[in-house]
Amino acid sequence: MSFEDDWRVWHAARENYAGAEYGPSALESTNWLITMPAAVEGIPGLWALTGDGGIRGSELGASGESLTLRGAETVRLGRRELRVFERQGALALRVFDPRRPQRELFSAIDAYPPRESWRLPAVFEPTPGESIVVTAVDGADHESAVAGRLHFELDGTAQTLTLTRGSQGGLRAVFGDGTNGLETYRFRFLAVDEPDPDGTAVIDFNRAYLPPCAFSDQFICPLPTAGNRYSAPIRAGERAVVLGG
């Protein structure tokens, strides 16, 4: 498969994911709960933390049914799907609705044409024991272990890209550049292949992708660290969500 064909397969998969019935565009609300039962807009019953890592819904019908959600469990009440979201030990109830207007209007993900020139050579520097403070879009901070840094050149200037490891173990970065707010969303994510044993690596900015919060403001995405913000424009990868009429 050619470079361009491979990118198009990736891009098509991204669009299918983004517009899926219960994909990121369907996230209607993120509801932080306490142990005191409270109503959640759009769904029946009263909802509260169980105190032992779960979320309990009670008074869900005339006969007073109840249910408890834990971990990766989901449940559907009518068309809406409920999921547990955990951040630094705090739990929220997320509500996904395929009838959310932004999901029904989702049309495509605008992206720059793929160019091999945006596959940049890099050298990986491991950073054992190092951590950074990551700020989320809602202002909350948390420490995250640094997996390493990639050293590369952008428009002839030496740069570094700080990497962490995602929940599935792969290397990832959050970065900003000179296109943000003008041609692209305010920041973007990037997955990076594992470096070779000698540290040789490639940064493929063609695979830069929109964070979940580009599809719904109910996601709580991490912002780029100061070292991952570049003044130079990176005209590669995904640009913005396209909503149809």
Image (cartoon, grey):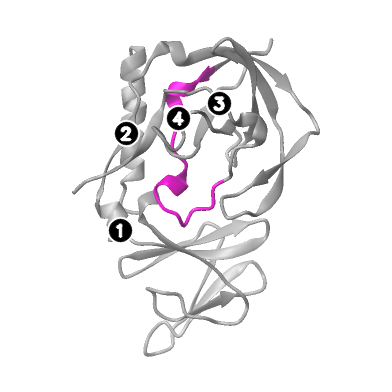
| N-terminal-most mark, 3 or 4 | 4
Q: Which residue is mark 2?
A: 110
In the rendered image of this protein, does residue 217 appear above or below residue 107? below
Q: Residue at x 49, y 28 (%)?
A: 178
Marks 4 & 1, CB-CB < 8 Å contact: no
> Regarding mark 1 in the picture, which secondary structure is present there?
loop
Q: CA distance from mark 3 to mark 4?
A: 9 Å
Q: Earlier in the sequence, mark 2 or mark 4?
A: 2
Q: Nearer the viewer, mark 4 or mark 1?
A: 4
In the foreground, 197 or 216? 216
Chain part drawn in magenta? 203-221
Q: Residues within 10 Å of mark 4 (few under 14, many from 20)?
A: some
The vertical placement of 132 against 120, above or below, is below
Q: Nearer the viewer, mark 2 or mark 3?
A: 3
Residue 155: image x %, image y %?
54, 13
Counting residues from the N terminus, which is met first, the one under dot 2 or under dot 1?
Answer: 1
Indicate the secondary structure of the residue bearing disc 3. Answer: loop
Q: Which residue is mark 3?
A: 231
Question: Which numbered circle lies on residue 98?
Answer: 1
In the figure, residue 85 lies in which quadrant? bottom right
Residue named by callout 4:
179
Q: Would residue 23 be seen by someone viewing this image from the given angle?
A: no
Report how far apart the C-alphas of labels 2 and 4 lie in the structure. Answer: 14 Å
